[in-house]
Image (spheres, rainbow, N blue to C red):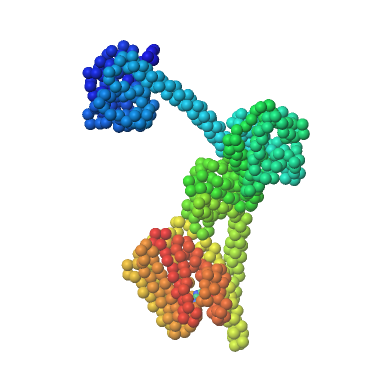
Amino acid sequence: MVMGSSKRILLVFSDIDAAKLLKKSLLSPAGHHVTITSDYKEAEKVVSFIRPNLLILSDGLEGVDSIKLANRLIIEQPTLPIILFSKKSTVINPRDVLNLGLVDWLNPPIDVESMRDAIERGLKRSDDWEKWLEKESKIHTGQLLETVDELETLLRVGRTITGKLELDNILTSVVEAAVKLTNADEGCILLKDFESGELYMRAAQNFQEDFVQTFRLKAENTIAGKVIETGKPVFINKPKSPQKIKTSYLVHSLIYVPLILDGQTFGVLGVDNQGIGKTFKQRDIKLLSALSDYSVVAIENTRLFSETEHERNNFSKILNQIEDGVVVYDDHGKIILLNNVVRKALHLENSVQIGRNIDDVFVNSDWLNAIKGVGLDQNGIEVIGKDDRIYQVNLTSISGIGKIASLFDITNLKDLYNLKTDFVNTVSHDLRSPLTSIIGYLDLIQRVGNLSDEQKKYIENVNFSVHSITSLINELLNLGRLEVIKDNQMEEVALIPTIQYSVEGFRNQAEKRSQTLTYKIDKKLPTLMGNPIQLRQMMDNLIGNAIKYTPENGKVEVTAKRLGEKVVIEVSDTGAGIPAEEKSKIFEKFYRLKNVDGSIQGTGLGLAITKTIVGNHQGKIEVKSILGKGSVFTVILPIVG
Ligand code: ADP
């Protein structure tokens, strides 16, 4: 009997007493754990639960044929040795006994010796199975551990590639991994110098440093050269006749796999053994191929990175060369780009601003608002830099990137503009006094003596011209004043009387030209915040023009109504109209229509003044016109400016 170790034995007996006797007399004294049952279902459960070392099965079980039960239990536990007890009368097919691989088949009368012998054989078979299983699983676990180790190494190299950018480190890791995984003596990466056609060593493991440094090899007629030419790996295992990889450099076994990018082989990853008798396995080719893919990715990444770096440098040079300031930030306000003009304007330190938030970099609220575009209109926003220069900031959105704030230095323009305004104001002012005296003298000449008709006509012409110059000067001065409107000049203006008085002021003029002048004002027209003098002037300019540029017997109509939080004023006429291409120009200073009748007096400043007034009130002015039919000037003013 197998002694020294207690085993699990299951007795499935129809006669429980016989089973107990067997347990007591033979099995328990030998130290075995015995489970007894007569229920076949329980037997099935016990087998799957305790995995017995031996099953002793009798026939005559209730509800099941013992051979069938044995079959089922063998499927559950294929290594289960079975001893079958059957009554002499039971007919059992010997083929079934063979198929089941029973340890023994016993019939009464059973002597203790054959019983003991059968049990011993059964337990020995169980032991043999266990030992075999243990050996097999050791072999498989070993292979599995080796595979896990290989995968871990590949994973580590993969991480090196994504984590590092220094090509040297990555390629060294790849070669190290190649040597480790294939258990090679040495390994290297050889790259082809396409200019000279030579191979050089880009990374190496276990080679002498000076060998690596000086390694240059003509690709032709070499093993590496062949791999580069064909794009196919080379696998040599010739322990007895060493191969030459370089003059007087002999190896006994080697694997070279190609490094291929876009179909072109540009190098090899290789491992070799100098030691006699050392060989590689076929699967090592697969491992090296995986590693070669890593090196290709790393080399390509580095190339792309340096290309991007190069472009970034160029871009940054250009950005810093341009004369305008540029700030680019993403949708969260993080600065992506910022050039030297901005740094200089705000005395910001060099290069630290990239990646920071605009709120932290532009600490001055005027600047922050300008960069964010708060209060931005088509004229941009003006800000003053620490360098005392004036910048106009404009904003552009780029979907997927964020916003670009561009800064133009308008200091010189501003100076010029101020110079021009001062000049116009001074000249106009200084011209006014001599003109007044000319008008006075003209008046006097007519009073002091009789003048001939011709003299009267000349004086009338002079008078006309002097009045033209005077109104031009007045309008210029007026425009100069209008361009600077102060908040304290704003008050609540009742629009109804403003419009009515303006219309009535032109009543005579219209009648003289036999024109119909009417107005229609919404009785509930609200008051609005504005400058009463300017608003009156705006109405005068529009109504005056309508009468001036409408022929006799024409019609001029003024309407005013409220539309939401806005007031809409329209001045329409049945005049000559304005050509479409000149519509935007009539608001420019001194612009007069090309087709305008020369006899109609004007300076070309009225609409420029009107547009400035509308702008001062945060409003909008537009014109619709049909040539030969008339024009409609529409002014839209917000009620609260
Ligand atoms: P002007 O002193 O010449 O009237 P404005 O600035 O008021 O200057 O107008 C500019 C030009 O626009 C005018 O010279 C005229 O040619 C054109 N214009 C203005 N209003 C009208 C109108 N109601 N109908 C036709 N043309 C007009």
**Left or right: 383 in relation to 184:** left
Viewer-proximal residue among 629 and 222: 222
Residue 172 location (% of width, % of height): 64, 33
Q: Is residue 244 left or right of residue 333?
A: right
Please report the residue visible at 69 percent of the width from the left and 38 percent of the height from the top: 190
419 up-or-down from 50: above or below: below
Image vertical order of residue 69 relative to residue 410, above or below = above
Quadrant in which the N terminus is drawn: top left
Placement of the C terminus among the 4 image quadrants: bottom left
Q: Residue furthest bottom?
A: 453
Is residue 614 at least partly visible in the picture? yes
Residue 507 seen in the current view: no
At x 50% / y 51%, what residue is drawn? Answer: 400
**Residue at point 27%, 31% (across, down):** 65
Q: Nearer the viewer, residue 281 or 229?
A: 281
Q: Nearer the viewer, residue 310 or 53?
A: 53
Q: Looking at this view, is 14 or 98 the one in front?
A: 98
- x then y, percent, for residue 293: 60, 41
Please tell me how many numbered marks the rendered image carries. 0
Q: Looking at the image, is 30 positioned above or below residue 442?
A: above
Image location (x, y in percent) of residue 469 = 58, 73
Kindly identify the residue that appears in the image at 75 percent across and 41 percent down.
221
- Above/below status of 335 relative to 614: above
Q: Position of residue 263 (x, y in %)?
A: 63, 48
